[in-house]
Image (cartoon, rainbow, N blue to C red):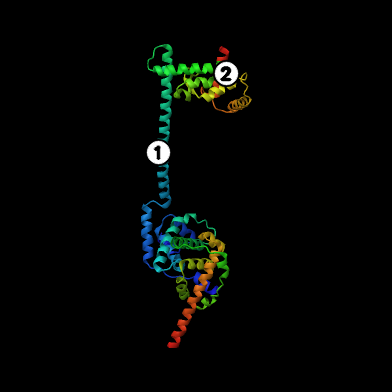
Amino acid sequence: MQDFKNKLLNYEQEPPPEIWERINTELDTSDHKTSPIRGFRRRSKLVFYGITAAASLIIIFLLSVVFDGSKENNGDNNSLASTETGKGNSVSQNTKDSIKLNNKTLEDIIKSSKDNKLIAQNYRGASNQLKKYITISGPSGQPVKISPKVATLIVSADNEYPPKPVWNKKIEKWKQIMLNTTLSPTSTNLLDIAQLTSNLDNNE
Amino acid sequence: MNGQSNHTPSESDLIQGCINGDRQMQELLYKRFSSKMYGVCLRYSGSADDANDLLQEGFIKIYKNLGKFRGEGSFEGWIRRIFVNTAIEHFRKKVKLYNVSEVQESTMEDTDISVLDKLAVKDIIVLVNELAPGYKTIFNMHVIEGYSHKEIAEILGINEGTSKSQLARAKGVLKKSLDKMINKTTNDTINN
């Protein structure tokens, strides 16, 4: 057994002479062509450029969406400011009426917190569009859309009446979470709205 | 320079020369190892054409990867391993080995092929080359190169049991071929 194994292991045979020629030719061509590693690098570069291009397109698209949104907001703000000063005519009468109505609705909700059926009453009379959101003026005068649910929460944030222990706990927990986060407060978050509510209460 | 080209370069000079792309050194390396490695290629491949392709592919790999040789172990061993791996890659592209169950494996009896010792190496090569590619690879790896079944299983991506059963079958086929060869030789002698 060991004998034939050794015979096979040490078996030698002269290869045909053209093999070296073939190797020689391949070495010549591979000297000029890119080696597999270079080829791999070239492929990686292409993949890298492709990914970069795709990422850039996505970023450009997202930025355009964000800037469009902020442009619209700025437009609204400007329009609102211009209405207040009586200079601008760009905001349609509909929008102005809608904001006015919404502000009034919110004020009614807050003022009439003892009547827990008020929200439903106010919204029963409102149009479908108005049922979805209430637009109020933010601290800087910008329009802020809030849902009726948030309006209910604002009412519920008042600990006086009607007593809502479950909601109060939830809101308290929410406040704590938001206070502990590193998120910077904006005009649309709950704390601002709660602050707005208390300001309105104080103004009363 | 002329004096240098007449003497046989040391192994490290040969390696360094090949790394530097010195074609003369590359040819010297080829001349030094081609016969042995051609033997390896012939054992693993089914035909002379395949063996030629393997030899060419193996040497190109060696020239391109010489920088990775760290001098641990023998240089010839490193070269042989590259050739065996090249042959295995070649084989893996062509043949799919199916895993077999333990039951099949246990029914395989080990065949005594020690009679091969009495044959000339060329006859043994002919017999081994008659094996199916899967059998031949495992026979070469286990019996000749000394890989364990576990190593073969890892390299070829098969079960250890499959490696064992394929080897047992390879030995069985070899035994049959040997018997045929012996009978033929005997008949020829009687007829003459």
Instruction: Give the mark nearer the N terminus: 2 vs 1.
Output: 1
What residue does disc 2 label? A115
Q: Position of residue A185 (x, y in %)?
A: 54, 24
- The quarter holding residue A54 reads top left
Task: Name the one closer to the observer, B133 or A17.
Answer: B133
- The quarter holding residue A50 reads top left
Mark 2–mark 1 Cα distance, whole angstroms, equals 58 Å
Task: Name the one closer to the observer, A199 or A4.
Answer: A199
Q: Position of residue A109 (x, y in %)?
A: 54, 18
Chain of residue at mark 1: A
Amino acid, disc 1 = Ala
Answer left or right for A41 relative to B118: left
Classify the position of the C terminus of chain B by image quarter: bottom left
For residue A198, above or below residue B46: above
For residue A145, above or below residue B69: above
Amino acid, disc 2 = Asp
Answer left or right for B188 relative to A184: left
Query: Which marked residue is nearer to the observer: mark 2 or mark 1?
Result: 2
Asked whether residue A24 appears in the rendered view, the answer is yes
Circle number at residue A53: 1
For residue A84, above or below residue B83: above
Tell me the element at label 2: loop
Q: Position of residue A197 (x, y in %)?
A: 56, 18
Tell me the element at label 1: helix
